[in-house]
Amino acid sequence: MHFKYLSLSLILCSLSVQAENPDVWAKQLKTEMESNYTLLNNRVSECKSMRKDFDYSKTLDTQWFTGLDKSEKQAIIKYGFAYASQQCALKERQSYTNSLINYVAYSGDKEPLNEWLKLLEGDKNLQQEINSIGIVDTQKFVSAYLSTPFDALKLLKSHKLF
């Protein structure tokens, strides 16, 4: 009987301590996630500042690209802009995504995940257009000519596509 009373007292004490203190592990995971988000935002800012170093006068006149119509060229430049931006901050995006998944898996708080997924959806119309142009050729072109951060509007204007 004394053992049952002691066990019950320890269980109740343990529950009251847990109720008073928020889950330390969930707080740690959330802090890590938020820290990685800050690092990602800082890197995105650095990537934006790199846009000024892009050579907007460089020729994009490959046989494949010149054979496309104006709207297809515009779509490829938009796709290249998104690709270059993502690649510039890839390491930080991966770190944030990993910490986000760890936090959500442990805490069950899906709000940050849902917000992240909305951001990652991107422009599905652009993705469909790139699929119809040819994703393999587009990726080759983007890798060769548009792999560093650039200002899409400025590039479109410099090539008289806007």
Image (tube, rainbow, N blue to C red):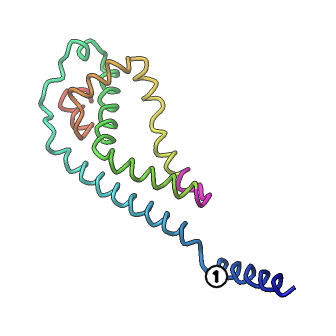
In percent of width and height, residue 147 lies at 24, 34
Q: Is 16 included in the stretch rendered in magenta?
A: no
Q: How many marks?
A: 1
The image shows residue 159, relative to residue 92, as above or below, that is: above
Residue at image coords 43%, 63%: 32
Would residue 135 be found to the left or right of residue 88 on screen? right
Q: Which residues are magenta?
A: 106-114
Quick one: 79 or 116, which is closer to the camera? 116
Query: Which residue carries the number 1 mark?
Result: 20
Q: Which element carries disc 1, helix, strand or loop?
A: helix
Amino acid type for the residue under numbered disc 1: Glu
To which quarter of the image does residue 24 belong?
bottom right
In percent of width and height, residue 40 lies at 35, 54
Quick one: 90 or 55, which is closer to the camera? 90
In percent of width and height, residue 131 lies at 43, 21
Residue located farthest toward the bottom when viewing the structure as drawn: 2
The image shows residue 21, relative to residue 159, as above or below, that is: below
To which quarter of the image does residue 162 belong?
top left
